[in-house]
Image: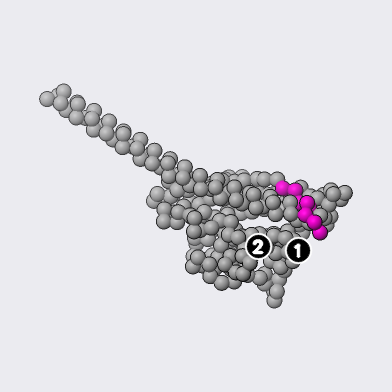
């Protein structure tokens, strides 16, 4: 009898251990899928940002007419605009976009994929119109379906696993230097830039900032709701780009 009880107890403990290991493996697998998705999106973002800066004309600099950071507030998620005299980038910060009390500062001039807002888009904009106010407001972004397809959605929600809470967003984007009066190299008319940004899951309840920095990280499991730990992931990126290779 005692031997039977001990055997049954051992079997029960073993089954519980196997179940716990299996659940942990599933969580790691699901988080790995999210990280892989972030890496795929980043390849597009990285390539487009770097090539657009390189295509900016000789002598081009970022200043308050070509670089428009839009700060977050109690009502706005914040975002920004960069106009490089061939391509412009417009974005809405992802952090907070799931909070119904906040609205993104930038929109399409119509509806695309059932909504007017977006995360990050590239616009063919040789006149820097995206950074020029009209009637006190910055213009809305042309739809990707407009004639000649002037807009490219770099973080397209159509390719994202929104059903399983893996919708991705650009959490922030900054560029330095961003307030120059002349190119860094006056001989070549070129300037070196440092671009910092974060890509991650777009669930406000899952993210926080790392103490002492502005870098976004996922909350600990005790601070997450439901299965958010399995899907939450955020990666901070810093890349270098050299502008001013284009032809005036």
> Residue at (23%, 33%) from the top-left corner?
12
User: Tag 2 or tag 1, which sits nearer the N-term?
Assistant: 1
Q: Nearer the viewer, residue 227 or 85?
A: 85
**Separation (CA) of disc 1 from disc 2:** 17 Å
Tell whether 207 sits left or right of 175.
left
Q: Is residue 215 above or below residue 101?
A: above
Q: Which residue has dot 2 on it?
A: 123
- Circle 2 SS class: strand
Tell whether 219 sits left or right of 2.
right
- Circle 1 SS class: loop
Q: Is residue 244 magenta?
A: yes
What residue span does the magenta drawing correspond to?
241-248
Instruction: Give the residue at the far bottom of this rendering.
Output: 135
> Residue at (67%, 45%) from the top-left corner?
239
Q: Nearer the viewer, residue 241 or 138?
A: 241
Q: Is residue 12 above or below residue 242?
A: above
The quarter of the rendered structure image containing the C terminus is: bottom right
Q: In this orientation, does residue 127 appear? A: yes
The quarter of the rendered structure image containing the N terminus is: top left
Q: In this orientation, does residue 105 appear? A: no
Q: Is residue 153 magenta?
A: no
Q: Which residue has dot 1 on it?
A: 65
> Residue at (58%, 54%) from the top-left corner?
170
């Amino acid at each position: 009898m005692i031997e039977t009880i001990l055997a049954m107890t051992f079997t029960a403990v073993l089954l519980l251990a196997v179940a716990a290991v299996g659940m942990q493996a599933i969580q790691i697998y699901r988080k790995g899928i999210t990280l892989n998705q972030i890496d795929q999106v980043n390849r597009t973002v990285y390539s487009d940002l770097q090539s657009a800066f390189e295509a900016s004309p000789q002598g081009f600099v970022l200043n308050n007419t070509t670089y428009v950071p839009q700060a977050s507030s109690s009502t706005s998620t914040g975002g920004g605009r960069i106009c490089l005299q061939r391509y412009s980038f417009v974005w809405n910060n992802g952090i907070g976009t799931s909070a119904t009390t906040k609205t993104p500062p930038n929109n399409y001039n119509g509806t695309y994929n059932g909504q007017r807002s977006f995360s990050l888009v590239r616009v063919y904009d040789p006149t820097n119109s995206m950074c020029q106010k009209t009637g006190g407001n910055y213009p809305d972004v042309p739809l990707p379906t407009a004639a000649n397809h002037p807009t490219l959605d770099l973080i397209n929600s159509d390719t994202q696993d929104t059903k399983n809470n893996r919708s991705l967003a650009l959490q922030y984007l900054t560029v330095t230097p961003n307030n120059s009066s002349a190119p860094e190299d006056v001989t070549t008319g070129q300037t070196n830039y440092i671009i910092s940004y974060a890509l991650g899951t777009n669930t406000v309840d899952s993210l926080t900032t790392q103490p002492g920095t502005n870098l976004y990280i996922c909350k600990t499991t005790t601070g997450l709701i439901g299965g958010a730990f399995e899907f939450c992931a955020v990666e901070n990126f810093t890349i270098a780009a050299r502008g001013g290779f284009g032809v005036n």
